[in-house]
Image (cartoon, coloured by chain):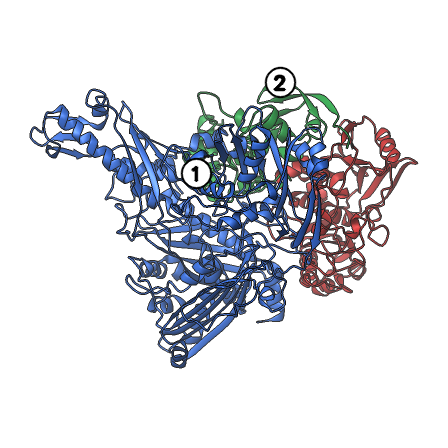
Amino acid sequence: MTTTADRTTKTNRKYRVIGTRPIRHDGHDKVTGRAKYGADIQLAGLLFGAVLRSPHPHARIRSIDTSKAAALPGVKAVMTGKDLPEKATPPGNFMETLADPQVLTENVMARGKVLYKGHAVAAVAAVDRHVAEEALELIEVDYEVLPHVLDVREAMKPGAPILHEDLRTRTTAQMPGDTPDTDGPTNIASHVQFVQGDVAQGFKEADAIVERTFETKPVHQGYIELHNSTASWSTDGNLTIWKSTQGPFIVRHQVACILNLPPSQIKVVPMEIGGGFGGKINTYTDAVAAVLSKKTGHPVQVVMSRKDVFEGTGPTSATHMRAKIGATKDGRITAVEVNLTYAAGGFPGSPVGSGAGTCLAPYKVENLKIDGYDVVVNEPKSAAYRAPGSPQAAFAVEPVIDELADKLGMDPMEFRLKNATRTGDRQASGVPFPSIGCVEVEEAMINHPHYKAPLEGPNRGRGVALGYWGNAGMNSSATINVTPNGSITLVTGSVDIGGSRPALAMQAAEVLGLAAEDVHPSVGDTDSVGYTGVTGGSRTTFATGIAVIKAAEDVRDQMIKRAALVWETQPEDVEFKDGVFTSKKNPEDTLTFQKLASRLMGTGGPVTASASADPKQVGPSFSGMIVDVEVDPETGKVDILRATLFQDVGTAVHPSYVEGQMQGGAVQGIGWALNEEYFYGDNGVMANSSFLDYRMPTSLDLPMVEPVVIEVPNPGHPFGLRGVGESSIVSPMAAIANAISHAIGQRLTTLPMSPTVVREALVNGDK
Amino acid sequence: MTPFRFAAVSTVSEASEMLRADAAGSRLIAGGTDLLSEIKEGIVQPQTVVSLQNVGGMREIVAGTDGMRLGAMATLTELEGHAEIRRSYAALAEAAASVATPQIRNVGTLGGNLCQRPRCWYYRSAAFDCRKKGGSICFAINGNSKYHAILGGGDCVIVHPSDLAVALVSLRARATIAGPGGERSMALEEFFAGPQVDIMRETVLQPGDVLTHVSLPAPSPNWRSVFMKSRERQAQDFALVSVAAAMEVADGAVRDARITLGGVAPVPYRVRQAEEALQGAAVASVDPARLGEMAVAGARPLRDNHYKAPLASNLVRRAVTLLLQDGA
Amino acid sequence: MTASSKATITLTVNHQAHRLEVEHPWTLLHVLRDLLDLTGTKRGCDRAECGACTVLLDGVPVYACQMLALQVGGRAVVTIEGLGDVQHLDPLQQAFLDNDGAQCGYCTPGFVLSAKALLDQNPDPTELEIRRALSGNLCRCNAYGRIIESVKAAAQLLSEAQPRP
């Protein structure tokens, strides 16, 4: 653990600031309660909105009568889906969007049909939250209840209730003819397929083959802060939205689509964010707050309840998966076949594509066939959750790899290393890997004392598994202003969810020869900084970092010109090193950055620089876990005795935050592995939509996870960074499953592996 | 949340009168940690919430020669930390310490813990019009039944949620109730009532009744007790199964034994067959595993809770083994 | 629908006495955030299940979301804004800052106050005692390890500041 004492210890000798551990810039406000989150905003005349949600998982809305609610004293406005433009209209295709705008509109408020319990159908604005909630009870909705379907396999069967009459399977398969019938209505939104080599031939060459099916439940991101939106629609048509979001520019774009507004008329102000993990990317209540504000002429705040968050915002997909892997006696994988079916929720868009693209990343495989199906079911629209899609797929592949190694009599890490991918090898998609650290991660695991430590005693087992996340690039912008005392302000468009402010400030400081404390980083609103993609995909410190470095280099070059002006020489004659400008012609002429900063007004005015980044060489991240468990055979309870998480991070900018991301992902994985799941009643209603019944780990439930940072620099970033936020959640479920199987001699193939499931396996044996 | 009136009375009889006068529209509040959840969820909508916070003496914990008297308004933190309870009624201290979280134990009371409503997720959700809310279906019987009863359920398969109840029944506690007809007291196990008695309630409390205190008999020097709770999270969780065992062991024989299970039935579930088998038995002859099996004789698991019977057996075996070791 | 009844209570918040008119169903959390603008106390579940709204009531941690204002009349509440002073952080706040005990920061005020109550009672807790004292507060960034280290560091800071005889 970090202490104040080792804050100055550098892990990376190449750099001055990179690799040190300065105190986070947002720390004071967070420990004193001053940090302002979305629901903390106070505005004159603020009204409170509340959203009525469907009690049925699938129903046609015959009519909605809001008259009684509107008549309740204190109610200022009521809205339904009819108050949103019928067609969502993208304002050009300049920007990326993460979801189909029409789907977003219908998810924000149902029209015609509700597709899951919790689907929004109407909303009110009132003088306080209590009146707003009371008013919801007065809205009368006439539903024609329709049969619903929750399970992906049921949803794929002929005769299953159809969610969208107009949905046809979109195929991105490489081999036509191998896809389902797409003539009629279906719940299969898409089929993705990757094929390489000859799988049938590969299995013929195998000496051992293992095939198993796996199932996982929906799990929620579980951020503690509730979703919120506060909107103010001015009479001039300008709309301001304050909110908790991972992507203010995504929200601007999505709201522009939904409300048919030019993006320039919408300002999204990102507040501090109380966790997101992928779940705070898409818009939910923003357009609702906006319409209510337009109707009332007041700012309107909507804050979800915890139940709304569980029932109305994205969990990650439930899955049904099958993996079949063959290998020769000497441990060479000859063929892999994987079938992934992911629940999308009420609208298309599960992360099955990235599951398919990532699940075989750690292995060089000549013959492979991966099929992925995105299937709509009557559950909330799934949303991204930390390395979306990858942890489930790893839970299908990694235990089969483990069992195969067992069958071949090989050490599971030796088997993996033998088949490890290297830079330039082809991914499942056919695209070659850029520079990767797969082998380095595996070697670090094999050589770590944990892997060699004896593990004795009954009902104990050790498991390993690998994880992979490709990481995202996307676009980012940054602006730097030099102040007269030589400190700088740094504005980026990246919401800080896990320490990106200090990590970005440190990159600027590195370029400009400053201390991290000399940089004041802040998160800009959508009017004050250039377009910046979501804080997600483990991209922020990497991609926004590149924008920051470019802006800092621009500042440096402008400052060199000013020094040249002061010394009446040419910029080529000015050297800049460690924060000091020196004249090459006359080495006595030196100016510190601070000194020069105080002379800007006399040498041409303020120095300011903006830059944007469009990185092409994203650095993917491999990871792995070694975990020791002890199973209580009487209660089925699994205790984690020791857990070590390995990850290639490229270069650790702020090692504490890198370790924090690694531990955070690992521990979310442990919760997913052992406790967390959605329970649905037969009526399609989630039975456990509370923090009491949806069991996230407490301080008494978790071991310390030891992080092992591996640095294989990414050539696509000036300082070698890779994204670090997500890869860590991929391996724990599989590693724990493997450990349990070694402890009890039974293979578990469902998540979560709760005491009840473990006990059933002990009693009933291998299924 | 439906608006309600908060009435802090100054005497128990005043509370009793208010509760009796408007049985349907009034609810008693102690710490409020449970009642406020129900009100916010919309499963109860009282007009009046009657608070005992200003009633004198209800929070007192008194130890005397004839045992202890525990005021219904004593908090779980106070029970957990009380020296005499820790010394002579270990199962109660352990049960109190196992409840929920420190924040809830600082507010939650003895009376509130014993009178809390079940945690069945179908009962707790306004989306399910279950039998306990006056509907006609028990959704758990054919639904998600992981946390439900394996014994004594019938038409409603809730489990009683109180950890304290399990410990107190094994400790031979008595409950004292003040009602419209005056005060009465009964063995605590008779205070609880299963769905066969009244599907809408879990206790024998009638309109106007107030649980005022719980008393514990004086401990004999050879008395030992223990509480064990199996749960999925080590905090903020109710029991999958819990057990409280109390035993008097002297001169190599079991003089007296009580074993109560939690998490298996709509009421704290006394394991009489095992208790009788222990009565007078020589310590050396006791087969704890056999007692464990007896404990769940007749269990009828639902779709998702087959794990409970063996889990209960194991906990009984562990508890008995521990107490016999302690007593030896 | 009946209109809510109103009542007046006195409440000491962060060492300052307040006289407040409240509606009967109002929670302490509503009073702190919406009447007194003390937004450091967070709403995360509104059901006494996450700990983001933890405040100290007469020195012990409670969930402000699940207590009625009328249950706490006449008593003393300390929120995160009541720790430390204008010049200095409370040693616990300092320790959370120094040890990266806050990540997204939303659960932080609750954790700091639970830890404050612990150290007030038990200046030298074991790790298990710390974990138990914090078990009513959820952190989803899973900074538990750093939070626990922060509490240990605060205990150290306090013992250095006030050497015991």
Closest to the observer, A632 or A237: A237
> Could you tell me which secondary element the residue under label 2 belongs to?
strand
Q: Quadrant of the N terminus of chain B?
A: top right
Given residues C62 and A527, the one toward you in this image is A527
Q: Residue extending furthest right?
A: B181
Q: Residue at x 54, y 67 (%)?
A: A744
- Chain A display color: blue
| Residue A414: quadrant of the picture | bottom left
Which label number is shown at residue A263?
1
Most distant residue in the bottom direction: A204
Near mark 2 (Cα within 10 A), the count class, few <14, some 14-19 or many ≥20, is some
Specify the quadrant that holds the C terminus of chain B: bottom right
Amino acid type of disc 2? Ala
Q: Chain of mark 1?
A: A
Left or right of residue B326, residue A369 in this image: left
Where B171 sits versus A402, above or below? above
Q: Tell me: B116 left or right of A574.
A: right
Q: Position of residue A196 (x, y in %)?
A: 37, 71
Question: Which residue does the numbered mark 2 point to in the structure image?
Answer: C17
- The chain identifier of the residue carrying mark 2 reads C
Tell me the shade of chain C: green
- Answer yes or no: is residue A202 visible: yes
- State the mark number for residue A188: none
User: Which mark lies nearer to you, 1 or 2?
Assistant: 1
Q: Position of residue B116 (x, y in %)?
A: 75, 43
- Disc 1 marks a residue whose amino acid type is Pro
Q: Colour of chain B?
A: red
Q: CA distance from mark 1 to mark 2?
A: 48 Å
Q: Nearer the viewer, residue B45 or B140?
A: B45
